[in-house]
Image (cartoon, rainbow, N blue to C red):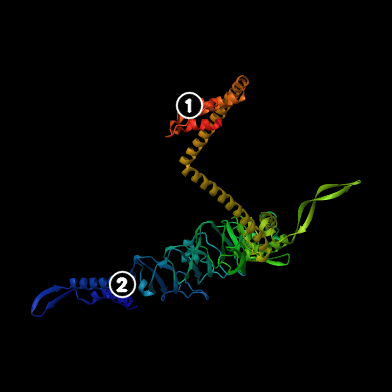
Amino acid sequence: MILLFLIVLFLIIAIIGPRFVKDKVSRYDDEKVTSMAPVRWAIRGAGITIAITCFLLTSCLVIDSDSVGHLKRVYMGDEMPQGRIIAAPGQKGPQARILPPGFHLIPFIRVTHDIEELPILEITQGTYGFIVAKDGNAMPEGQFIAPAWESANDMIDAMKFMGYDIEDGKPKGIKGPQLTVLPPGHYRINRYLFDVFEGESTPVPAGHVAVIKSNVGDDYTGNPILPSGVDASELSVPIVPKDYRGVWETVYNPGEYYLNLKAYEVTIVDTRVQTWKYLGGYTRKWIDLIVEDNGNITQDPHQEVVVVPDDAADSAIVLRVEGWDVFQDSRVQVQVTPENAPFVVASVGGLQQVEDKIITPNYRSILRNVVAEEVEYETTEMVKEGDVYVEKKVMKKRPRQVLDLLYHREELEKAVARDLIPTSGKAGVTVQWVRFGDPAVPPSLLLPGKRKQLADSLIATYRQEKIAQEERVKTEKERARADQQAVLMKSEIGIQVAENNKEARTKQGEGEKSYLSLVAQGQERQANVLGKDKAFELAYIEKVLDAAVKNPQIIKVPTTLVAGSGSSLEGAAAILGANNLTMGLKQETK
């Protein structure tokens, strides 16, 4: 106001001041007259210059590059209507108009308004700006948040929001929270009209979708939107087209979104194939069989606590079979398709709720029911047909046994999956397969089979060892035979020589036999001519002579000559002379 007073003052001085200055001035001691026109012009110039300077000081302002000028009219305006916070042009109070960075020349702006520089609004990456308007039309009944704007920039334009850019001057915007949010960026926003709160963006990772449940919008009155085979009674929230109130049938694919979390509930659904595990929560017992050196089999019992893994859906399922409690580890592979994700959210709220409230209890019930079923098996029976009995194949039923969990695992897996697939389909979950782990069978049930298996294995081992020993002995024999090969060859040659000598002597004997036969015949004939005694003597002399020829050393000449007369042998002895042979001949004749 002081500047405005000075402007008026100096303008008055510039206009009226020169009138108080005479046109000419003369001195008493000098008749010369001085003109005062320059003084008048100087007064006018000074007054105008000072007035203009004061005007500029009241009308010029510079807004920094990172700030926004906010105006509040305090003088020379009408009063705002009751309940208004943002004044219309010409009214006193906070103004809808803001001043961007730079130089501004607005007459007497500094006189009529208070000017406040506030920083430009910055929304950082990964966040969004949630807007709350302090003025505008009243929120419609039944709504808690204002409808969305087509453009966020139009929304934060206070002149458009308040309707001061049109003739009737009625607000377009609604007072209170706004559905439209500001994505990351820099904004020149009227802080007198808008409060801005920071919210986090909604990232949707790969392999997931975002299902939106809207708490705002019109109610959908069209036909129910449901997967095939499901009725609307299974939904806690209706599935609706986008922008209606309810769960949107349209999902958000992987990316980053700036959704107003005051109006929308976002559920991230994993659409990848995943495995739900039902493991642990029991004590596993088993017995090891040990074969001692003497062949006896002893038992060594063990046990361990199997805990439930952190990533497991639940603990192992306990089954009652043949009066035994058997803990069955298992896995179920499931998937929620993007098309079924809205139904999952609308029915139970999310995948975790599906797992806890639908799949797990139904899976436990189905598995127990399947194990409790009777199974058919084929057997043969004697059936009477007429007067005779014939053997025929018949089908019978029996309760399931504990060992079926071990030896008929695939059959049980298929039976459980058969019943679980339609049940899970009603919740929007696709079951792909069911797999069993090793059941915690009581060791006393397995012990007889283990002992028999071990005994059979030992028998087979002993047989193999016997064969190995026999092969070893055979090998040792062959090795020893190889070591004595020279001796064996010599022995074999000796045997062969003996065989040859045997054959030669046999043939020689046969020749001798023939020869003696012929000699005997000659001697017999000789005896017939000479007489048997003479023939004997002749043969005797021949043998003696033949022996003397072959062995001359047997002939010994004595010192005394013995002579005699008589038989014909004496004549032979006389011819041979005095020796031991002739002496023998003489004795033979006596």
Mark nearest the camera among 2 and 1 is 1
Q: Amino acid at mark 2?
A: Leu
Pick the residue in front: 566 or 442.
Answer: 566
User: Which is nearer the N-term, disc 2 or disc 1?
Assistant: 2
Crowd class of label 2 (few under 14; some 14 to 19; many from 20; radius 10 Å) = some
Residue found at the very far left of the displayed protein? 29
Q: Is residue 290 above or below residue 33?
A: above
Pick the residue in front: 212 or 509.
Answer: 509
User: Can you give x and y, in whole percent of width and height, for residue 488 in the image?
Assistant: 49, 40
Q: Secondary structure at mark 1?
A: helix
Query: Is label 2 in contact with label 1 (beta carbons under 8 Å)?
Result: no
Identify the residue position indicated by label 1 in the image.
574
Pick the residue in front: 251 or 409.
Answer: 409
Crowd class of label 1 (few under 14; some 14 to 19; many from 20; radius 10 Å) = some
User: Can you give x and y, in whole percent of width and height, for residue 140 in the image?
Assistant: 60, 69
Q: CA distance from mark 2 to mark 1?
A: 198 Å
User: Can you give x and y, in whole percent of width and height, for residue 164 in the image?
Assistant: 48, 66
Does the image show residue 9?
Answer: yes
Q: Quadrant of the N terminus?
A: bottom left
- Relative to 254, 400 lies left or right: right
Does the image show residue 502?
Answer: no
Say the numbered circle drawn on residue 55.
none
- Relative to 574, 416 lies left or right: right
Q: Amino acid at mark 1?
A: Ala
User: Can you give x and y, in whole percent of width and height, for residue 221 in the image?
Assistant: 67, 59
Pick the residue in front: 21 or 558.
Answer: 558
Residue found at the very far top of the displayed protein? 529
Q: Quadrant of residue 454?
A: bottom right
- Relative to 426, 51 lies left or right: left
- Relative to 394, 131 lies left or right: left
Q: Quadrant of the C terminus?
A: top right
Say the numbered circle drawn on residue 57.
2
